[in-house]
Image: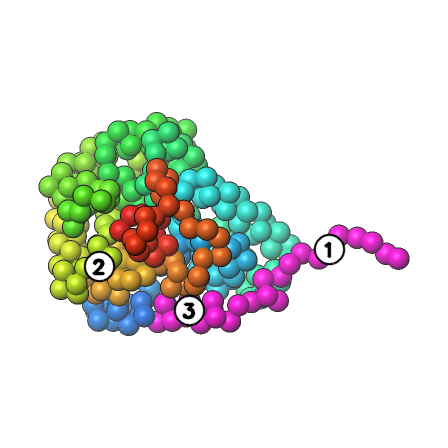
């Protein structure tokens, strides 16, 4: 009787047709919303929020070409980044693991989208390509310190509480331009744009108004930047409202359960928060809504 190691699992052999269908639908809806705002689908970055997805699901969307992935907790971000790096390394010698027959991506781009504790800034900087939730100078300074030995600056978004909800994180709109200016004095941190969220229960008119105010603030800050500063990302819109956000000017959206379906693992809150309170819809965002 011959013994040996079990063959590596092939995501293509366990492909979930409903996952592919949901992902394709989200991509189409992004394209339709982009067209309404006079843009192409390629102008919009989709961040697939993976916090309640299984690793098999994450590997499958990567095999479909989805390379921007988002997590809301630093510990899970680090764990999943390591697992995905290992998987892609194995796929270099065994491309069939991706099930696409195409080239194996060198890496995926991880986004830290949840509230970030200052004492976890170093771990976030080591793993995330973009940190979406900088809303105070002290956190930005911690990110600066954590980035001092990196070859490239850490890239961040300033989170702005455009809706004014007390339950939300984010700097007040009037204070956002000054925070951007302070970050731009930091050699090892690059402010790439803004992030905001709207209330989950907002009426259509209110929702559109919030996103339009966010776009106006974004344009105001961008217009005042010196030539060569890349303040060009407006991250707003989640699975309940990403189409409206795109129509109002978003060029990055964060979508989780609309792609991955019912949670494959228990849902947790942001890095500083516990589980989302009962009755509060989170849409796999990792943030209180």
- What residue lies at 86% left-to-right and 56% top-to-bottom? 2
How was this image coloured? rainbow
Return the x and y of residue 214 as percentages of the image width and height: 16, 52
> Real-space Cα distance between discs 1 and 3?
31 Å
Q: Quadrant of residue 123?
A: top left
Q: Earlier in the sequence, mark 1 or mark 3?
A: 1
Check disc 3 and report its element: helix, strand or loop: helix
Q: Which residue in the protein does label 2 denote?
A: 201
| Mark 3 Cα-neighbour bin, 10 Å: few <14, some 14–19, many ≥20 | some
Q: Is residue 256 visible?
A: yes
User: Measured from the top left, where is residue 20 in percent x and y?
Assistant: 47, 69
Quadrant for residue 14, please give it.
bottom right
Q: Closer to the observer: label 2 or label 3?
A: 2
Whether residue 177 is situated above or below residue 57 in the rendered picture: above
Residue furthest out toward the right: 1
Tag of residue 187: none
Q: How many marks?
A: 3
Q: Are marks 2 and 1 in contact (CB under 8 Å)?
A: no
> For the magenta stretch, what is the residue range?
1-28
Q: Secondary structure at mark 1?
A: loop
Question: SS of the residue at dot 2?
Answer: loop
Q: Which residue is mark 3?
A: 22
Which residue is nearer to you in this view: 215 or 117? 117
Of callouts 2 and 1, the N-terminal one: 1
Residue 198 counted in the magenta span: no
Residue at 15% across / 47% down in the picture?
164
Q: Nearer the viewer, mark 2 or mark 1?
A: 2
Q: Earlier in the sequence, mark 2 or mark 3?
A: 3
């Amino acid at each position: 009787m011959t013994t040996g190691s079990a063959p590596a699992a092939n995501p293509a052999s366990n492909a979930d047709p409903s996952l592919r269908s949901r992902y394709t639908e989200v991509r189409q809806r992004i394209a339709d919303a982009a067209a309404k705002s006079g843009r192409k689908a390629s102008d919009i970055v989709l961040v697939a929020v993976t916090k309640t997805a299984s690793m098999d699901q994450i590997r499958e969307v990567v095999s479909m070409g989805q390379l921007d992935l988002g997590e809301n907790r630093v510990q899970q971000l680090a764990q999943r980044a390591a697992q995905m790096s290992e998987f892609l390394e194995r796929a270099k010698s065994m491309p069939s693991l991706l099930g696409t027959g195409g080239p194996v991506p060198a890496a995926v781009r991880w986004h830290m989208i949840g509230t970030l504790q200052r004492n976890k800034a170093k771990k976030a900087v080591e793993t995330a390509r973009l940190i979406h939730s900088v809303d105070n100078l002290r956190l930005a300074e911690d990110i600066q310190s954590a980035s001092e030995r990196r070859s490239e600056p850490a890239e961040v978004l300033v989170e702005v509480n455009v809706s004014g909800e007390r339950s939300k994180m984010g700097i007040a709109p009037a204070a956002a331009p000054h925070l951007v200016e302070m970050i731009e004095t930091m050699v090892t941190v690059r402010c790439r744009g803004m992030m905001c969220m709207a209330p989950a229960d907002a009426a259509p008119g209110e929702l559109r108004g919030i996103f339009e105010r966010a776009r106006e603030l974004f344009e105001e800050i961008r217009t005042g930047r010196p030539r060569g500063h890349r303040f060009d990302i407006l991250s707003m819109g989640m699975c309940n409202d990403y189409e409206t956000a795109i129509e109002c000017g978003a060029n990055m959206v964060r979508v989780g359960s609309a792609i991955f379906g019912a949670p494959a693992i228990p849902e947790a809150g942001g890095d500083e928060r516990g589980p989302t309170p009962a009755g509060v819809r989170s849409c796999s965002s990792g943030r209180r809504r």
